[in-house]
Image (cartoon, rainbow, N blue to C red):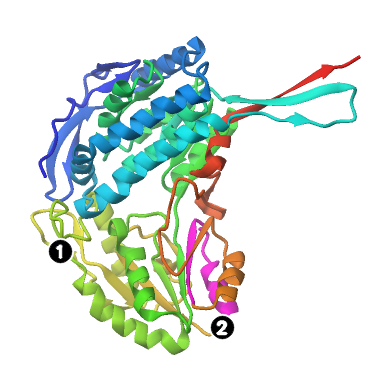
Amino acid sequence: MSTPEIEPGRLFIGGQWRESSSGARTEVIDPSTGRVATTVAEADATDVDAAVRAAREAFERGRWAAMSGRERGRVLHRIAQLIRENADELTALESLDVGKPVSLCRPVDVETAADQYEYCAALAQTLDGAVRDTPLNAFAYTRRGPLGVVAAITPFNFPLILSSSKIGPALAAGNTVVHKPADETPLSALFMAGLFQRAGLPDGVVNVVTGAGPVAGEALLRHPGIDKVAFTGSTAIGRHAASVAGAALKPVTLELGGNAAHLLFEDADLDKAIGAVIKAFVFNTGQFCMGGPRLLVARPRYETVLGILAEAVPGVPVGDPRDPDTVVGPMAGERHLRKVEEYVDLACREGGRILCGGKRLELNGGYYYAPTVIADLSNDSRVVQEEIFGPVLTVQPFETEDEAVELANSTRYGLASGVQTADLTRAHRVADRLQAGIVWINDWAMLDPAVPFGGVKDSGFGREYGPEALASYTKTKSVVIAMN
């Protein structure tokens, strides 16, 4: 698959492509080779201000917000159609930018983005209010409308999906958007800007500024013209984003770090369970905030499961993301690779037993790490308690259901969890007790735009997907008319 021609990395502001005010540019690295793929404009506070002003002007003119939900839905449908028509180009860009295997990128990343805009097209027609019965001598009703200008700040691991999960519902509600993609992975965001324009989105409704988080991202967070912040990224930066938004009394949605537990009970179907366990920790090279890096296994099955994993995991195909047979590609960058290496080294010092993997792979100069399984770590190990964000699985035994739940809930995160069991009653019971925004039973990563996800504890607050996401991009106004 060839890489498409990339719009020469300019900012997209007010419907126009432009260079940054400083003329500065930043390199985009192909993680499969470690070499420079292209460069993009590096925005500063002046560029962010221009983008916010363009979004504000587009909102105040009211052309987008004044459309009926059905009219906005037609544009969103057209965006979904264009994503599918340009699936080859988006797949190539996302694979080049992030190191995603093309075998997964098209059916997962590209199709999910199209599904999200399609779903939001339908949601756009649900923004109705309600008549409220009161004892007042009055007629009372509510109206729902857009918030205004939304700052969408997205991470490096799922650029296309996690931008659509914010931009889609924001547009459906009638808002305008300034999107700041991760500085490492901006290419699909720039390509999408062109698709938005072709779909008929009015100028200024979506603006894209590329650049460094501490500069462009910070300027966007602090800009007084922003009415809502939607952020996905690390817990540390999310906490900072929340403090800045809170100081300005702006609503914020945060989807942050995760360290999900995967509970495998004695009655689980091992053939299906092992497949789900491996998928949960190697999907997207482990760079998945809803991945399953902690496996908890019922004691009678513990050694059996360790043996199966030690034999099966080394057989997972690792290699060039452009190869259709590849399942695990490179890490997205050198710093992410070093972080994984540091955690595995720490696991060895903490008494962990490396069953397989545990090393960097020298492949074409890229940032590859072998899928790794570690046993015998205590629950207070940093490797168990902290988010590694790479293809690393820790395995711990449990004696009882209560202990399994206690171990699963023992970290500061609460984004996702999983349960492998043949007992449906147990599945419901355990799911109810797990402190997580989404719980999967007998599989992993079953996601759909209709099903909300998000975190508890240090994994954030607010929800993406579903009608819950649309609600977070609206404000409710009550109208009360005296009847005397």
x 46%, y 35%: residue: 120
Q: Is residue 373 among the parts visible in the rendering?
A: yes
Looking at the rendered structure, the number of numbered marks drawn on it comes to: 2
The residue wearing badge 2 is 400
For the N terminus, the quadrant is top left
Local crowd at mark 1 within 10 Å, few (<14), some, or many (≥20)?
A: some
Q: Which residue is found at the position 44% from the left and 43% from the top?
A: 237
Splitting the image into 4 quarters, where does residue 86 fall?
top left
C-alpha separation, residue under disc 2 versus residue under disc 1? 38 Å
Q: Secondary structure at mark 1?
A: strand
Q: Where in the figure is residue 21, as x and y percent of width and height? A: 27, 16
Circle 1 residue: 361
Residue lying at 90% horizontally and 30% vertically, measured from the top left: 135
| Residue 250 shows in the view | no
Specify the segment rendered in magenta: 400-421
**Residue 127 to residue 103: above or below:** above
Task: Please rate how many residues cluster around mark 2, counting C-alpha atoms within 10 Å: few if below 14, some from 14 to 19, many from 20.
Answer: few
